[in-house]
Image (spheres, helix red, strand yellow):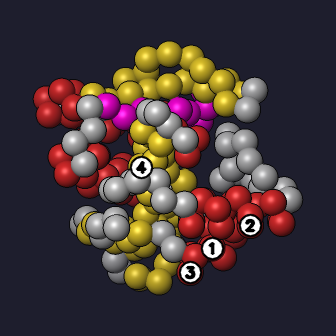
Amino acid sequence: MLPTFETGRLILRPRTLADIDDCLAMDRDPEVTRFIPGPWGDPEAHRLFLTSRMEADFGDGLGYWSIFAKEDPKQFLGWILLIPVDAVGPDIEIGWRLNRFAWGKGYATEAARPVLTHAFGTHGLERLIADIAPGNTASIRVAEKLGLSPTRETTYLGQPFASYQMTRDAFEAR
């Protein structure tokens, strides 16, 4: 079971099937999914993809959290994940996706901090990664603010991505 986290402005709770309509609506915004390959244009495939991710057991302490504003706990801002890369591993990735109305407010960085503490503290990871499309400058800024460092170029479904990482030592040295 995943823990629930609270920050100054946010509530992060384990994502469930009750969040599927909010997730589908967020992903239908082409700006939100511009840098992320996926079945976003096919409603049936999109729903099946989300359902499979929501029902998956990624291992103890791993999964997705839905992000809500404390001032309006029903307002779905987006989600953050800590799962095996591409859901199969072996590396563990951190990632985030927010509704466009939530961009530029520091929510991704704020939501990622307790997840990083969970990853390296509670869960005991030695390192984690974030694969980010080179044009996704907002996500790159979030990764850099969190202390992740670029390590290599990679591809995902034929598209270029930059791989960022953080080790436990780097996390503890922050």
Instruction: For mark 2, give the secondary structure.
Output: helix
Nearer the N terminus, badge 3 or badge 2? 3
Residue picked out by circle 1: 20
Nearer the N terminus, badge 1 or badge 4? 1
Label 4 neighbour load within 10 Å: few <14, some 14-19, many 20+: many
Residue picked out by circle 4: 82
Q: Which quadrant: the C terminus?
A: top left
Question: Bounds of the magenta span?
Answer: 127-139
Residue at 55% x, 33% y is: 132
Residues under numbered marks 3 and 1 in contact, where contact means CB atoms less than 8 Å apart? yes
Residue 103 spot, x, y in % from top left:
52, 55
Residue at 38% x, 28% y is: 165
Label 3 neighbour load within 10 Å: few <14, some 14-19, many 20+: few
Seen in the image, is 150 located left or right of residue 101?
left
Whether residue 26 can be seen here: no
Instruction: For mark 3, give the secondary structure.
Output: helix
59 in the magenta segment: no
